[in-house]
Image (spheres, coloured by chain):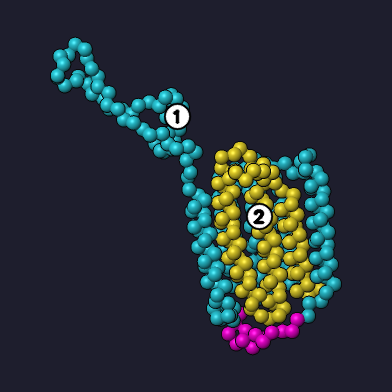
Chain colours: A cyan, B yellow
Amino acid sequence: MEVVGLILLGALMLASSIGVIAMRNAIYSALFLIINLVSLAVFFLVLSAQFLFVAQILVYAGAIMVLFLFTVTILNPPSDVLFGGTHRTQYVLALLFGALFGGILTYTVATNAINGARGNYSAQVAAVGDIQAFGTQLFTVYLLPLETTALILLVGIVGAVVLGRHVAEAPAPRRTYKLQFFTDTTAPPGDLPAKQEAMPTPPPNGAEQSESQKERVGT
Amino acid sequence: MDLTTYTLLLSAIVFSIGGIGVLIRRNPLIMFMSIELMLNAVNLAFATFAHQLNNPEGQIFVFLVMTVAAAEAVVGLAIIISIFRSRRSVDVDELDVMRG
């Protein structure tokens, strides 16, 4: 019964990974990748990595894929043309080398039995459980990589903020405000002018630039 | 075929599918998704060896890879958005000058 479940899970993972690379619509690829990530999380659960099961769903399927979907929706790419005419040689070569690489990897894995000496964590894992052994290892032996990943995340945040700034295409022209006095020739000099209006001078280019200025200001 | 060999085979096949996806797709978003596929295949291999050798260090490496992949996805997508925001089409073949 478990074998059937594992085979189905592997088939789901393979089908979804083929779906990622073979879809024309980018959103369909993202949804197939979500299926792939969740099936991988179930594999983590089968392999007794319970923390990774939760972390995979929270981080990968929950945060990174949401980011991908936001980006796909913002960019709104047109439907790709798979196997276009100008790149046919590249496609054939890529498939060939991909199949060759996959074949070499699969052959190596299938013919070599992985015999490893079991580490000295069996007793510890049996005593405290999988997650506590993982956490103890993470915070004692691998503390420096953990803090370095925190630094990496900080750099990523700063980079995203810097890259997401709005950079103006051209320096904004200086807006000069001129008071235009409505001088009535019939009024005696020295009196206050009849109508006094202060308005920004219209840009010399006409209406187009003012629209772009408005767009930049956001009114 | 035991569990270790089965998941390692899956990891190898998914990795090569991701590699093919990077090579044959021209949309930068789908290329990024194929890179994530490859990273996840490697994560599966790490977790398999953690299970085989009964050593939680493999799971720790998965955790670190996941974190680095998150940071890389953030910065990479920000770069893609800032490049392709003003263009009509998303096609990496059109990025042939460094001036952008």
The amino acid type, in three-letter code, at marker 1 is Gln
* Left or right, A140 with reference to B33: left
Q: Residue at x 69, y 77 (%)?
A: B51
Determine the CA span between mark 2 and mark 1.
Answer: 40 Å
SS of the residue under disc 2: helix
Q: Which mark is residue A182?
A: none
Task: Please say if B57 is above or below B72.
Answer: below
The subunit carrying tag 1 is A
Q: Which residues are magenta?
A: A116-132
Q: Residue at x 75, y 74 (%)?
A: B4
Q: Quadrant of residue A128?
A: bottom right
* Left or right, A210 with reference to A80: left
Q: Quadrant of residue A61?
A: bottom right
Mark 1 residue crowding within 10 angstroms, few (<14) / some (14–19) / many (20+)? some
Residue A92 position, x and y percent, is: 82, 48
The subunit carrying tag 2 is B
Q: Residue at x 14, y 19 (%)?
A: A190
Q: Nearer the viewer, residue A32 or A206?
A: A206
The amino acid type, in three-letter code, at marker 2 is Met
Q: Nearer the viewer, residue A101 or A48?
A: A101
Q: Nearer the viewer, residue A201 or A161?
A: A201
Residue B37 position, x and y percent, is: 68, 59
Q: On the image, numbered disc 1 is attached to which residue?
A: A209
Residue A98 position, x and y percent, is: 79, 56
User: Magenta segment: does it hold A209?
Assistant: no
Q: Which mark is residue B33?
A: 2
Quadrant of image for the N terminus of chain A: bottom right
Residue A194 visible in the picture? yes
